[in-house]
Image (cartoon, rainbow, N blue to C red):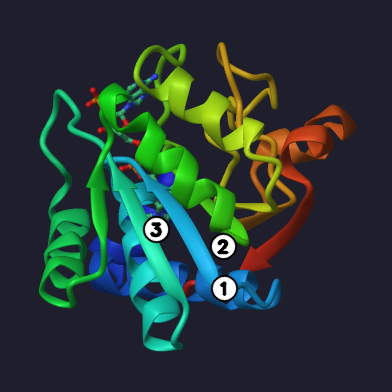
Amino acid sequence: MRAIDRRATVKYGIPSILLMENAGRAVAEEVRKLKPRRVMLYCGSGNNGGDGFVAARHLANQGIRCLVVYFQAASAMKRDARLNFNILKKMRIPLLLWKRSMEAIRQKQLYSADALVDALFGTGLSREIGEPYASAIAEINGARKPVVSVDIPSGMDADTGKPMGACVRAARTVTLALPKRAFSRPSSRAWTGRVVVADISV
Ligand SMILES: NC(=O)c1ccc[n+]([C@@H]2O[C@H](COP(=O)([O-])OP(=O)(O)OC[C@H]3O[C@@H](n4cnc5c(N)ncnc54)[C@H](OP(=O)(O)O)[C@@H]3O)[C@@H](O)[C@H]2O)c1
């Protein structure tokens, strides 16, 4: 998938921000099918998180109340993700930096959320899940709300389908361009839920 993404952007000159826009819009469309009034989105600092920021923009534009939980990662937010994050700021969409001390606020918001979006990690997951992401995944799974994962449930190894320490249990996974190798394993379905393949124009 990474090679295909690279070809789309380098060989064919499709701007990566356009792929992110298509991905986020497809996620928003899938979330809308759940007819939520309030959505909480958990977004990491990579392009997967960027897809989540785009989805939040489209959901908010459609009158759905969104709260975006984002993370202060060791590495800075990726460029396209940062651009979309800044748009959310200008739109005054509520943004909440993940902090353990904010748990009470998040629990209150989770209680009234109708659906969650998991945009923590996609194909860029490169090691076992540690803190604070393990706590975030536990919070998502513990909320007992329908979860839509972006590309891959966060924590799943995209090749083997095995959780790398912890993994989001999604009701639906909007996977981008093509199903990931892991999804051919029947055991992965317990984590992905229904898999929807979204065309992002690669
Ligand atoms: N061209 C595009 O724009 C395009 C096209 C298709 C899909 N996508 C989307 O982009 C995703 C891939 O984006 P990406 O490559 O930026 O990867 P990502 O899945 O968004 O995750 C990458 C980030 O996660 C960090 N990370 C990896 N494993 C971690 C762990 N266990 N704990 C904490 N941090 C960890 C990495 O930081 P370190 O640097 O510290 O490792 C990196 O900042 C796809 O899944 C899809 O959602 C984008």
Q: Can residue 8 be spotted in the picture?
A: yes
- Residue 50, given in percent of the width and then of the height, sits at 30, 56
Mark 3 or 2: in front is: 3
For the residue labelled by badge 3, is the local secondary structure a helix, a strand or a loop?
helix
Total residue callouts: 3
Residue type, numbered disc 1: Asp
- Neighbor class of circle 3 (other Cα within 10 Å; few <14, some 14-19, many 20+) is many
Instruction: Find disc 2 in the rendering and name its residue.
Output: 177
| Element on which disc 1 rests | loop
> Horizontal and vertical percent for residue 136?
45, 29
Is label 2 in a helix, a strand or a loop? loop
x 14%, y 55%: residue: 82
Q: Check whether the beta carbons of the residues at disc 1 and disc 2 lie within 8 A of each other.
A: yes
Residue that numbered label 3 is attached to = 52
Circle nearer the viewer, 3 or 1: 3
| Residue wearing tag 1 | 199
Asked whether the residues under the numbered discs 3 and 2 touch, taking CB atoms below 8 Å apart as contact, a structural biologist would say no
Q: Judge from the rendering whether residue 90 lies leftward or rightward of residue 181; answer left or right.
A: left
In the foreground, 161 or 194: 194
Q: Quadrant of residue 167?
A: top right
Earlier in the chain: of badge 3 and badge 1, it is: 3
Query: Is residue 165 placed above or below 40 in the rendered structure?
Result: above
Q: Is residue 173 left or right of residue 62?
A: right
Q: CA distance from mark 3 to mark 1?
A: 16 Å
